[in-house]
Image: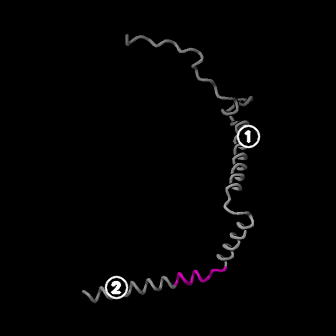
Amino acid sequence: MFNSPSPPRPAASIPKAPPPGSIPQPRPDGLPHERVPDWNNIGLFTAGVAVGAILGAVVALFLAPASGEVTRHRIGRRVHGVRGSDDVWEELAEEFERAAAETGEEATLAASET
């Protein structure tokens, strides 16, 4: 009962060979194999990327929170604000000096308590 051989598989269940562009193809002169690109899959992938980029641009245009003129103005204002903001570094330096002074005061206070 348990030792009975399994029935032979039908021919439809035998795996099929991959398409000729996706496996190494033998050379006619018998030299080592070379890989042949599968241009159908490459073209399909490229078309998918192009369609995705177009759809992404269309969705971005429809879902933009402001008009193009307003958006360009906002971007330009931010770029000019970042370029001319040397005072940011000065503010950061002042903040570091304040933090160092507070740390020094805390250290002297802790030393005097002990």
Residue type, mark 2 in image = Ala
Q: Is residue 58 above or below residue 104?
A: above
Q: Quadrant of residue 69?
A: bottom right
Which SS class for mark 2?
Answer: helix
Which label sits on residue 107?
Answer: 2
Judge whether residue 43 is colored magenta: no
Horizontal side of residue 65 vs 108, given as left or right: right
Which SS class for mark 1?
Answer: helix
The residue segment tinted magenta is: 84-93
| Chief SS of the magenta region | helix
Q: Is residue 98 above or below residue 23?
A: below
Q: Where is mark 1, residue-wise?
A: 43
Judge whether residue 88 is colored magenta: yes
Residue 77: x and y, percent?
A: 69, 74
Residue 40: x and y, percent?
A: 73, 36
Q: Quadrant of residue 65?
A: bottom right
Q: Residue at x 74, y 28 (%)?
A: 28
Residue 108: x and y, percent?
A: 33, 88
Alpha carbons under labels 2 and 1: distance apart:
68 Å
